[in-house]
Amino acid sequence: MNENIIAYIAEERKPYEETKSYKTYTYNEDWGEKNDKKLKPQIVVLNLITKDVTIIHTESSAGHVSITTDNKLVFAQFPDKIKYGMIYCTNRYSTVWQCNMNGNNMECIINQQTSYKNHPLITSNHAPVENVRSLRYDPEGNALYFLSNPVTFFPHGSCSRLFKYNLNTKTLTLIIDYVNEISEKYGDALSLNFPGIFSHQLPHQCCQHFIIEGLKKESIIFLTITWGTRQTIIAVKESTGTLMDLTVDKIKGNWNIVYISSNYILANVKSPSQPSCLMLGKITINGRINVQWTPISTSDYGEENNIILNNICSISKTLKNPTTGGEFDIIVDLIHPLLLIFSPLLTGLVSFGYTITLINYTGSLGYGQKKVLELVGKIGELDISDCYTAAEAVKKMTLDTVTIDTEKVFYNGGSHGGFIGAHMISKYPSINFKKYYLKKRCCLRNPVINCGGMLLTSDIPEWSPLELGINWDMNQPPIISGELYQKAFDCSPIKNVDHVVTPLLLLLGEMDRRVPRQDSFIYARLLKSKNKDVEVVLFPETGHALDSIEAEKYSFEAIVNKFSKYL
């Protein structure tokens, strides 16, 4: 590999003639949330010695570019005739291409027609490779590993498959298949109840080679995945397909791989009682994969904060929905020792004495593909029913040294969680409260208020129909008919706005492209017309995640201020 050359992705510059006359103002679609006004991404090759710059023009938008050991470019292409929001979505068509450093001899090496062989443990039928994400090389640069998700008629989050492409033999192999149900035993997994791969991306250097018994070279792939209520690190032995959870008996928290070398894993782990800690894992293989974890960083948050963090307790429970019979998990956070995930907002609320319930309602990731698809066609019903069941269960829980005040119930949720919250304050009458379920206060962050509005103005218009179980052709999207809009509207919280009695706080991002804030404005206007208590906070230059410094700081301040008024 020529180390004097680098390749990267940059926005395509408009031709000079298109900067004159009316063409200056020609509208071009972008890739939605966090990609406002970004032009077509293209490959740029820079020679660090000669300073020569070569632009590789591709038919579609390019990404994930890298240079192979024999000095070729490998990259992904995304169809861009019609663009959809890209961030947070795995259901996007893509292909893998290869060409010379000057752009010649361009060929598609992985697409939906590419045949592949299954790992011997996999017996399922072939499904086309519709999506290619997170291209990673093995240490010698001879093979590519990548994740792939189903795209056609699938929700924007689902179980992934793990593939390997041999650049020398040009063969594709499926290493880990979708897992339908976690009750299924996957191959010769050492860890039971493997839910499948639920991961946004593969870590860099994910594949490492080890010499076993002094002779045999073995490839091990390391991944970070969502597994039920936690995020963990797993290892996959490529030759046998053996899976192993590397953190199951360690710190109960949110693990994420930072870096991998041949003998070590650097990982970040955090929990509500431990904001962040670096762990160094030494890898050994004696018949099976072993990792000895050692903390290498600590943080002092001050005596007062440490007392709060050390006394936070987390309880994980599996509940059964009495209406549907389905099971789902919840985590209850309160003051008392241990924990699973960290969120400054939630930890802050716990420090103020709130008991927090985190609900993995049906359709949540990390429980197999079947659980994801169970919500399809039941959005606005099953997810709401699960959350109501969880809230009722927590109200009845008996906890040592802690008393839950069941007369002071609050809701805080964003995006789909905001959709659920808006339903909760209008849809469920409570025997205990005699009015509506959340009597005290509700905070919704960039909530989905009208699924019909999502069809028209969201950067992911397919979200509503796909969750409703209605097919959506990504390449030839349908006209939004009155019938389609009505179905989307009927499952939406805005339909029951007349039932809302709960004081409401809406936290919105001015730059949100994912969920139309106009629907929240209309929702607030309707409530104000009925003299209901509603307040809207709009954060400038902030998108769907509300992740700007101002939004994170003042969101917490607003929530604590509004909730405390009703204690």
Image: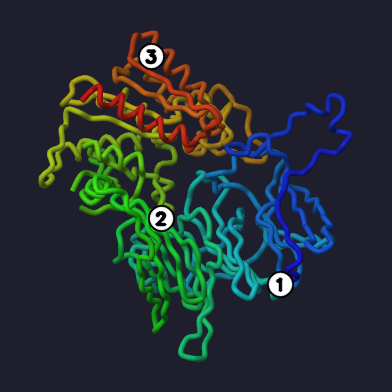
**Which quarter of the rendered picture does the N terminus lie within?**
bottom right
Mark nearer the N terminus (3 vs 2): 2
| Foreground tag (2 vs 1) | 1
Please state which amino acid type lies under the numbered disc 2.
Thr
Which mark is on residue 69? Answer: 1
**Which quarter of the rendered picture does the C terminus lie within?**
top left
> Which residue in the structure is indicated by mark 2?
226
Q: Is residue 55 above or below residue 293?
A: above
Q: CA distance from mark 2 to mark 1?
A: 33 Å
Q: Secondary structure at mark 3?
A: helix
Foreground of the two, 323 or 550: 550
For the point 69% across and 75% down, the residue is 169
Foreground of the two, 518 or 181: 518
Please state which amino acid type lies under the numbered disc 1.
Thr
Task: Confirm whether residue 408 shows in the render.
Answer: yes
Question: Would you call the spot at circle 2 few (<14 residues within 10 Å), some (14-19), or many (20 or more)?
Answer: many
Q: Secondary structure at mark 2?
A: strand
Q: CA distance from mark 3 to mark 2?
A: 38 Å
Which mark is on residue 117? Answer: none
The percent coordinates of residue 75 (x first, y second) are 69, 58
The percent coordinates of residue 188 (x first, y second) are 39, 74
Q: Secondary structure at mark 1?
A: loop
Q: Toward which corner of the image does residue 499 lie, by quadrant?
A: top left
> Which residue in the structure is indicated by mark 3?
527
283 displayed left or right of 163: left
Please state which amino acid type lies under the numbered disc 3.
Leu
Q: How is the image coloured?
A: rainbow
Q: Is residue 307 above or below residue 84?
A: below
Q: CA distance from mark 1 to mark 3?
A: 62 Å
Mark nearer the N terminus (1 vs 3): 1
The percent coordinates of residue 522 (x first, y second) are 47, 17
